[in-house]
Image (cartoon, rainbow, N blue to C red):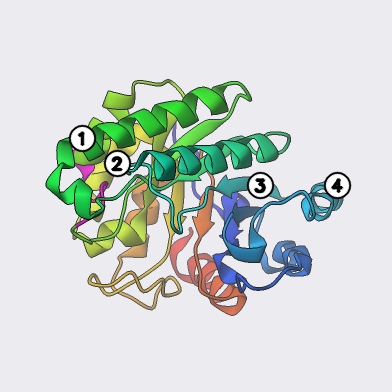
């Protein structure tokens, strides 16, 4: 089925806000800019907490935004072979899943990465990553939530750079509520946008959009790098998923959605 791509399914990620900013007031301007959703990235002061949950609930009550959640990644590692670190990673991620369960149905998570010990024992680190994803999927299933594990940027110590690797990860976890969060910008740093779409289209449950020149994870606004957005959007248009613009600022987010409206979306 071809759903046809339009701006009715585009969110802005809270990466656009300063992580030191405590206020969510900026979210109230998203609909005026044309966004229909907000992805809460649980990093810094933009992370969910008991203190700011009333503010989030007010946004839900007073806007029509669709909310998704991105689990934290700083200082955490699903592939850690250090048991206390791995256990803390799982604990924090489960807490955020539970906190978001009243309003979010989709949860984004980064796969684990190789620590210095993991580089010596990569097979063990891979298995620990699989175990961690299973734990999260089983926890999320209690709340009817889907986990979207994200393909990653071109860095040698990170799992999830290649399409076959992501398919193997999803197959190994073997949970019905696990799919792929397809990050177009990350795939472009691996020269793998086309192959990800070709091989993984049926596993995609969520999409991240940002641009770069094919080398670094620049998070440029759409149209400021080398990604062929007309081709990408055309190939992804049949997906009934939320598309999230990951921008470095709110202005960059607006520039991206304006570009997609004027130059890409038919």
Q: Which residue is mark 1?
A: 124
Q: Which residue is mark 4?
A: 61
Res 185 quadrant in image:
bottom left
Give the mark nearer the N terminus: 3 vs 2: 3
Q: Position of residue 35 (x, y in %)?
A: 65, 60
Q: Which residue is mark 2?
A: 81
Q: Is residue 65 left or right of residue 160?
A: right
Q: Are marks 2 and 1 in contact (CB under 8 Å)?
A: yes
Can residue 199 be seen by looking at this rendering? no
SS for callout 3: strand
Q: Could you tell me how far apart the alpha carbons at marks 3 and 2 are, in whole angstroms?
A: 33 Å
Q: Is residue 203 left or right of residue 205?
A: left
Rendered image: mark on residue 67? 3
SS for callout 2: loop
Q: Which residues are magenta?
A: 157-164
Nearer to us in this view, 241 or 74: 74
Q: Locate the N terminus and report the quarter of the image it occupies.
A: top left
Pair 1/4: label in front: 1
Give the mark nearer the N terminus: 1 vs 4: 4
Q: Could you tell me how far apart the alpha carbons at marks 4 and 3 are, in whole angstroms?
A: 12 Å
Pair 1/3: label in front: 1
**Residue 221 belongs to the span the image colors magenta:** no
Q: Could you tell me how far apart the alpha carbons at marks 1 and 4 are, in whole angstroms?
A: 45 Å
Q: Which SS does the magenta portion mostly show?
A: loop
Give me the residue at 29% from left, 59% from top: 153
Q: Could you tell me how far apart the alpha carbons at marks 2 and 4 are, in whole angstroms?
A: 42 Å
Give me the residue at 47% from left, 43% from top: 89
Q: Give the vertical position of 34 relative to 62 (above or below).
A: below
């Amino acid at each position: 089925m071809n759903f046809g791509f339009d701006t009715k399914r585009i969110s802005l990620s809270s990466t656009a806000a300063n992580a030191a900013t405590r206020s969510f007031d900026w979210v109230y301007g998203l609909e005026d800019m044309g966004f229909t959703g907000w992805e809460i990235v649980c990093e810094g002061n933009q992370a969910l907490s008991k203190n700011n949950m009333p503010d989030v609930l007010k946004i839900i009550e007073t806007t029509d935004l669709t909310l998704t959640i991105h689990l934290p990644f700083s200082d955490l590692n699903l592939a850690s072979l250090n048991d206390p670190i791995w256990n803390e990673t799982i604990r924090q991620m489960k807490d955020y899943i539970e906190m978001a369960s009243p309003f979010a149905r989709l949860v984004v998570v980064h796969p684990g990465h190789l620590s210095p010990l993991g580089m010596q024992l990569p097979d063990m680190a891979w298995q620990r990553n699989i175990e961690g994803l299973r734990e999260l999927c089983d926890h999320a299933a209690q709340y009817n939530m889907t986990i979207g594990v994200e393909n990653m940027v071109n860095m040698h110590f990170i799992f999830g750079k290649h399409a076959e690797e992501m398919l193997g990860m999803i197959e190994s976890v073997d949970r019905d509520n696990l799919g792929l969060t397809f990050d177009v910008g990350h795939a472009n740093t691996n020269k793998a946008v086309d192959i990800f779409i070709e091989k993984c289209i049926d596993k995609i449950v969520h999409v991240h959009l940002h641009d770069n020149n094919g080398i670094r994870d620049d998070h440029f606004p759409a149209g400021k790098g080398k990604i062929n957005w007309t081709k990408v959007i055309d190939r992804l248009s049949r997906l009934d998923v939320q598309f999230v613009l990951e921008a470095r600022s709110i202005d960059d987010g607006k520039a991206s959605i304006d570009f997609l409206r004027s130059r890409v979306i038919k």
